[in-house]
Image (spheres, grey):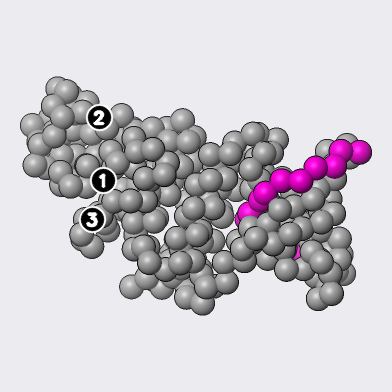
Amino acid sequence: MNRFFTDGVVLKTKVTGESDLIVFLLTEQRGLVRAFAKGARGMKSKLHAASSLFTYASFGLSEKNGVYNVTDADVKESFFELRTDLARLSLGQYFCEAMLKSVTEETDEAAFFRLMLRAVFYLNQGKKDLLLLKSAFELRLAVLLGWAPPIHACAGCGTFLTDKMYFNCETGELFCRDCGERDACPEVSASVVSAMRHIVYAPFEQLFAFTLGKESLETLTRLTQTYLQNCLELRFTVLDYFWTAYR
Ligand SMILES: [Zn+2]
């Protein structure tokens, strides 16, 4: 039997048996881990507090024949505030679902963990615009998955920037004013292009440190949402709840 500790965030829980849970953890060292948390539904269990959605904790895990059990947990942050608002809560659930579809088991992908933890931290803190968090999360996740859109220049002629450009949500290509319209791609302003480049190329520490007007943020996140869903080849229904709550 293997025993180890790893930091992790709870992405999903599933009831099993009378008092047990299965928790889906995004861990720093092992990627996605699906583990049994025996007795976690009992109020007196030491695993109870560590087994709710979004909780960030140091988890003690044991593994035998590919089956994981949570043996211990030390909660570092429960991110309670983000549950108090429906828009924030549904956006957080979307982040969890997107990670569940992106990270595979037994991958050593600390970058996914860092992105999730930082996004949930800002979501809980409530100081950053939700559409900024959403866009940065979506596009950076696509980058981590190997689908960095080639937006350093116009895909047609190599021009760096024109006052309006066009983004192809299928291929991630960017087109300048002269090359773009024939492809019927959505129009993007120069400031939205700059924000996209920031999200793709900035060092992780600066990922969420950019500003953009309300209207441009909405354009940006419509594009990043479509692009990520195209990359993953699926649609997230939780986004319907988010957009309803956000309005
Ligand atoms: Zn061009």
Q: Residues within 10 Å of mark 3 (few under 14, many from 20)?
A: some
Q: According to the image, label 2 marks what residue?
A: 152
105 part of magenta stretch? no
In-image side of 90 versus 158 (left or right):
right
Secondary element at tag 2: loop
N-terminal-most mark, 1 or 2 = 2
Q: Residue at x 77, y 58 (%)?
A: 73
Dot 3 and dot 1 residues touching (CB under 8 Å): yes
Q: Which residues are magenta?
A: 1-15
The amino acid on which the numbered mark 2 sits, given as a three-letter code, is His
Q: According to the image, label 1 marks what residue?
A: 195
Up-down relation of residue 83 to residue 139 (above or below): below
Q: Tell me if residue 16 can be seen.
A: no
- Real-space Cα separation, disc 2 to disc 3, in angstroms: 19 Å
Secondary element at tag 3: loop
Q: According to the image, label 3 marks what residue?
A: 212
